[in-house]
Amino acid sequence: MKNYHIALGLIVLISCQTKKEIDPTYITIPQEDQKILRNLKEVQWPKAYREQDTVLLNAILGDDFQMVDASGEWSNKAMELEWIKEHAMENDSFFYEIKRLDVLPNGTAMICGTGHIFNDSIETIYQSSNVLIKRKGVWKAIASHVSGIKKVE
């Protein structure tokens, strides 16, 4: 009977471990990673665009970064760096609202949310999703998608 309980206990442990690996609700985001990712998306990334800081944006984007913008156009890291050199931000203020932040056990993070752009008391919003990978202890953005740009009445 003792062997039966040991075997049953092992089966329960294995099934719980499998459930944790499959079900993202079991994923615990390390506090330090959550803090770094929030700062990256809410502070550093907007700062790079606002200040036309190609050095900062270069540090945020992985060399394999690709983006699909709201019109369906693709760009890569070199194109984004060139774009911010040529386009100064023309808004009064901006903030990004994270609505979803997931960190997977394999070092992949997904940040999704809403960008809020204010200009002359008119708000424009857009939706975006971003995929980041932790490489050698540093988070790098590898993909972004923007859609749903609209003025808020």
Image: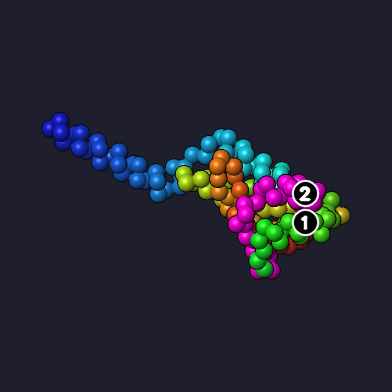
Residue located farthest toward the bottom when viewing the structure as drawn: 72
Image: 38 above or below 74: above
Amino acid type of disc 1?
Ile
Q: Does the residue at mark 2 contact the one at mark 1 (Cβ under 8 Å)?
A: yes
Quarter placement of the N terminus? top left
Report how many numbered discs are placed on residues in the image: 2
Image position, residue 62 (x, y; %): 62, 52
Dot 1: few (<14), some (14–19), or many (≥20) neighbours within 10 Å? some
User: Is 69 one of the magenta-colored residues?
Assistant: yes
Residue 56: mark: none
Q: Which of the 4 image quadrants contains residue 42?
A: top right
Image spot of residue 147 (x, y percent):
66, 62
Q: Residue at x 28, y 40 (%)?
A: 12
Quadrant the C terminus occupies: bottom right
Residue range highlighted in magenta? 47-72
Q: What's the residue type where badge 2 is placed?
A: Asp
For marks 2 and 1, the one nearer the N-term is 2
Element type where label 1 sits in the image = helix
Residue 60, image x, y percentages = 66, 48
Relative placement, left or right, of 82 versus 102 is: right
Residue 69 lies in quadrant: bottom right
Residue pictured at 51% horizontal, 45% vertical = 107
Q: Residue furthest left?
A: 1
In the displayed image of the protein, which residue is found farthest to the top? Answer: 2
Q: Write down the residue under mark 1.
A: 84
8 over 132 or under it: above or below: above
Picture residue at 25% right of the left edge, 41% below the top: 11
Instruction: State whether residue 102 appears in this view.
Output: no
Residue drawn at x 40%, y 46% is: 21
Residue at numbered disc 2 = 53
Q: Is residue 48 magenta?
A: yes
